Image (cartoon, rainbow, N blue to C red):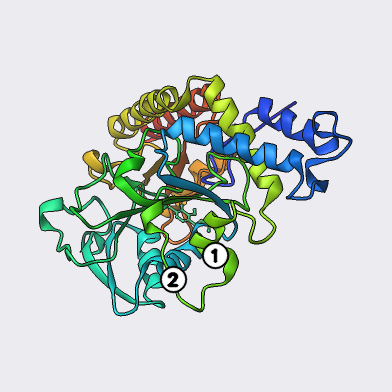
Amino acid sequence: MSRIHNFSSGPSCLPEEVLREIRDGMLDWQGSGMSVLEMPFSSPEYRAIAAAAERDLRELLGVPARHRILFLQGGAYAHFGILAMNLLPPGGSADYVVTGLWSERAAAEARRHGAVRIAASGAHEGYRGIPPCESWRLDPAAAYCHLTTNETAHGVQFRELPETGAVPLVADVTSDFLTRPIEVSRCGLLYASAQKNAGCAGLTVVIVREDMLRDAADVTPSPFDYRRQAECNGCVNTPSTFSVYCAGLMFAWMRRNGGVPAFAQSTARRSARLYEIIDGSPLYRCPVEPAHRSQVNLCFRLPGRGLEREFLEQAARHGLHHLEGHSAIGGIRVSLHNATPDTSVEALIAFMRDFAARRHAAA
Ligand SMILES: Cc1ncc(COP(=O)(O)O)c(C=O)c1O
C-alpha cells in the first residue's frame, strides 16, 4: 500500500494496522454476519464495541470513576455552545482564557448562551504565548473556567493545567488528546473531536465529572443534554456508531503500543527535533515563545508568501503533504499525531534541511 507523508491537522493519518482492522469490521464484524455500519445501536454487538472503547479510554487517560465518558455527535465546535447550554446557570457567567483562534471561537459561541468574561487573552500579542497565570482575572463565582490546551491554528500549548481554585476547569483538548497525560481529576469537563488522534470525524468525546451534570438550558436539544445522555448511557439518539468503532480501535492500538506515556515521549522527541531545525536555520522562524510552543502543531514562517508557496510545492513533490498553515493564519504547520510514522518525520527533516541549504547556496 503506497501512502503519502500526511501532516494534516485533522482528519489526520491513521495507522495502517488500524485501517486494516476497520476494513475487516466493515464487511463482517467478528463473524457476526453484519458490518459495523449495519448494527442497531441497541444490539449486544454495538454495546460491546462502545463498552470496550470506553474501557480502553478510561485506562489510557486514567479517567476517575466519578467522571463519565460520553460519545456524542456535533464536533468540538458545536460543543463550544452546547457546553455553555449545559453548564451556565441562568444569571451565571463563565471565564474564558483566550490563547488563539479556537478559544476565541469557544468564547464567541458560549456568549450566545450566557455571560462570558475574558479572564486573560493573548490576542494583543498576536497569540505568541500564554499570558502568565498571575495576570489572569479569574472570577471566583464563575460557573467554570474554559481553556484550549492546544491551539491547533496558532501552535500554542499549555505545558500544564492552571490552578483555578474552586472554579471547575473546562478544557478543549481536541488537538492534543492522547498525545500526553492529562490530569482528568482536575477537570470538571474535557472534550475532544475524534478526527486527530482518536479515529475519524463524527465523534466528540466528552468526559464530565458527575457533579457537573446539571439542568441544561430548556433550549438544549435532548441529544446534547449531557445529563440525559449520561443517564441513558449515551443512547438518547443514534450515536455515531462507526466513529465510535474507529475510536475504539485507535484506543486499543495505543494500549498495545505503550499507552499515553509512550506517545508523549515520541511527541516530545519528534517536536524537539523539528524545532531544532527551525531554530537552527535563518530561513525558518517560529513566532511562538519557546515555553508555549505546541508539540503537536508546529507553526513557522519563511520570509515571504512566495517562498512559503515554493516550500509547500517542493514538499508535495517529495511526498510531504498538508503542511499549509490554518487558512486564517497562513505559513507552514506540521501536525504530529500519534499515528504519524517516524519515517514521515525523518523525510520532512531531510527535506527542510535540504531546502534551507539550497536557499543558502543560492543567496
Ligand atoms: C482545538 C480545536 N477545537 C475545536 C475544533 C473544532 O473541531 P470540529 O471541526 O470537529 O468541530 C478544532 C478543529 O480543528 C480544534 O483544533
Q: Which residue sits at x=31%, y=28%? A: 276
Task: Name the amino acid type tagged 1.
Answer: Phe
Q: Which residue sits at x=61%, y=40%? A: 199
Q: Is residue 283 left or right of residue 24?
A: left
Which quarter of the image is occupied by the N terminus? top right
Residues at circles 2 and 1 in contact by the CB criterion of under 8 Å: yes
Q: Which residue sits at x=19%, y=48%? A: 163
Q: Is residue 35 left or right of residue 224?
A: right
Residue ID for mark 2: 85
Q: 10 above or below 123?
A: above
**Is the CB–ligand 1 distance for label 1 below 8 Å?**
no
Q: Nearer the viewer, residue 224 or 110?
A: 224
Dot 1, how many residues are within 10 Å of its Cα: few (below 14), some (14-19), or many (20+)? Answer: many
**Is the CB–ligand 1 distance for label 2 below 8 Å?**
no
Dot 2, how many residues are within 10 Å of its Cα: few (below 14), some (14-19), or many (20+)? Answer: many
User: Whole-percent x and y of residue 197?
Assistant: 53, 39
Task: Name the amino acid type tagged 2.
Answer: Met
Residue ID for mark 1: 224
User: Whole-percent x and y of residue 171?
Assistant: 36, 52
User: Whole-percent x and y of residue 128?
Assistant: 25, 52
Q: Nearer the viewer, residue 50 or 136?
A: 50
Q: Secondary structure at mark 1?
A: helix
Q: Which residue sits at x=62%, y=38%? A: 51
User: Whole-percent x and y of residue 11?
Assistant: 59, 46
Task: Specify the label residue 82 is tagged with.
Answer: none
Q: Quadrant of residue 146?
A: bottom left
How much space separates mark 2 and mark 1, taking CA atoms?
A: 9 Å
